Image: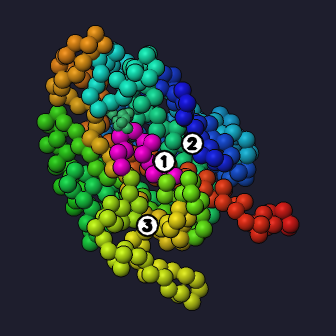
Amino acid sequence: MAGSSYGTIFRITTWGESHGKGVGVVVDGCPAGISLCEEDIQKYLNRRKPGQSAFSTPRKEDDVVEILSGVFEGKTTGTPISLVVMNTSQRSHDYSEIASYYRPGHADYTFDMKYGFRDYRGGGRSSGRETIGRVAGGAIAAKVLEELGITVCAYTKSIGEFTVKSENFNLDARDTNPLYMPDEKTAKEAEEYLNTIRENTDSAGGVAECIVKGLPAGIGEPVFEKLDANLSKALVSIGAVKAFEIGDGINVCTSLGSDNNDCFYFDGNGISKETNHAGGTLGGISDGSDLVMRAYIKPTPSIFKTQNTVNKSNENISINIKGRHDPIIVPRAVVVVETMVALTVLDMMLINMSSNIENIKKVYNN
Ligand SMILES: Cc1cc2nc3c(=O)[nH]c(=O)nc-3n(C[C@H](O)[C@H](O)[C@H](O)COP(=O)(O)O)c2cc1C
């Protein structure tokens, strides 16, 4: 299977299926000397863990991470860091029917068309569990960024029609409600909406927003490796993410140049922008303001409503999916978005180190 690796210098390779023995990641290119322990990674995995609220799958998985290599005496050694999470809550019989038919909205049909054979238990590589490797690897990237004074923070922006209101925005509220919404009032309304959706055996979608603070200007490449292009790939590669926006996003097409341009000014120390419609990049390169982006996430495909589909004998059938599924993916995807952004930003910072001779002299002429 191609395409399980992501990143150029800080590079992750995720592996494992949801109902195999375990899932994990190999992180290559992490600088030596970063203090790292299991708890640094576990706290991110705990935010992704299922079974924590009525709005995530009732699967109870501990998702305990173990560091197998690349760390000695509490510090990274510069060698590949291997992380594993054993699968402990599989109920593969729930999925045995899926072997014979194609779930609408999931990857069963396309997987069969590509490989002719698939691990149908829980979606295999197309399961939400694949994101454990991303989150574990991204937790390390976030730790490195922290040392550089850069923070990455994601939260639920919308669930269905319920969107966080700027006047109620309170980041401290994010971790006190099961939807990871930084607005207690809207979170309550969204919870009621989701309860109705769940009672109707349906699912809902929404938006995760992510903000990077402290990123200096000058990071990114001007053509194929634009910072915004790479962030888009990072987020759209997450299962169920269907669109990406940076800054004002799709609204720019109805804006005027005079509104959309961010005017510059000198603030006594350096150059700043009066506004941030661009979301922190110009020409694929960071401009020193906050990076602001959004991932648009579809409703969970596996729903318990009766649906039409086709089985492997080409018969039209009606199905009732079994198994344990998230009625909404967004809250669990928030930390996946955050860590994919951390991976991308760190990788692009490392790539940028060779962009001019002065940077290289700083390393070798001292
Ligand atoms: C964190 C996370 C959890 C997910 N949980 C489920 C789930 O419980 N049931 C399901 O059908 N899909 C779930 N998905 C979505 C599927 O993985 C995804 O829709 C599927 O692979 C098809 O890919 P696509 O939607 O990108 O086309 C989850 C995705 C993520 C990121």
Indicate the amino acid at tag 2: Tyr
Residue 237: image x %, image y %?
45, 42
Frontmost residue, 362 versus 245: 245
Looking at the rendered structure, the secondary structure element under dot 1 is helix
Q: Which of 159 and 315 is in front in this view?
A: 315
Classed neighbour count for the residue bearing mark 2: other residues with Cα under 10 Å, few (<14), some (14–19), many (≥20): some
User: Which quarter of the rendering shows the C terminus?
Assistant: bottom right
Of pointers 2 and 1, the one earlier in the residue sequence: 2
Compared to 361, does 175 lie above or below? above
Residue at (44, 23) in percent of width and height: 114
Residue 293 sits inside the magenta stretch? no
Q: Residue furthest bottom?
A: 268
Please report whichever mark, 2 or 3, sits nearer to the chain's N-terminal start: 2
Label disc, if present, on residue 104 of the rendered structure: none
Which span is picked out in magenta? 230-243
Cβ atoms under marks 2 and 3 closer than 8 Å: no
Q: Quarter of the image containing the N terminus?
A: top right
Ligand 1 within 8 Å, label 2 CB: no
Q: At 43% across and 68% down in the image, what residue appears?
A: 278
Image point (66%, 56%), residue name? 350
Where in the figure is residue 242, as x and y percent of width and height?
A: 35, 45
Q: Kindly indicate whether the residue at mark 1 contacts the one at mark 2 (C-beta within 8 angstroms).
A: yes
Q: Name the residue under label 1.
A: 234
| Residue located farthest toward the right when viewing the structure as drawn | 365
Q: What residue type is labelled 3?
A: Gly
N-terminal of the pair, mark 3 or mark 1, is: 1
* Residue 279 numbered tag: 3
**Residue position for label 2:** 6
Residues 219 and 46: in front is: 219
Residues at marks 2 and 1, CA–CA distance in whole angstroms: 8 Å
Q: Do the residues labelled 3 and 1 touch (CB within 8 Å)?
A: no
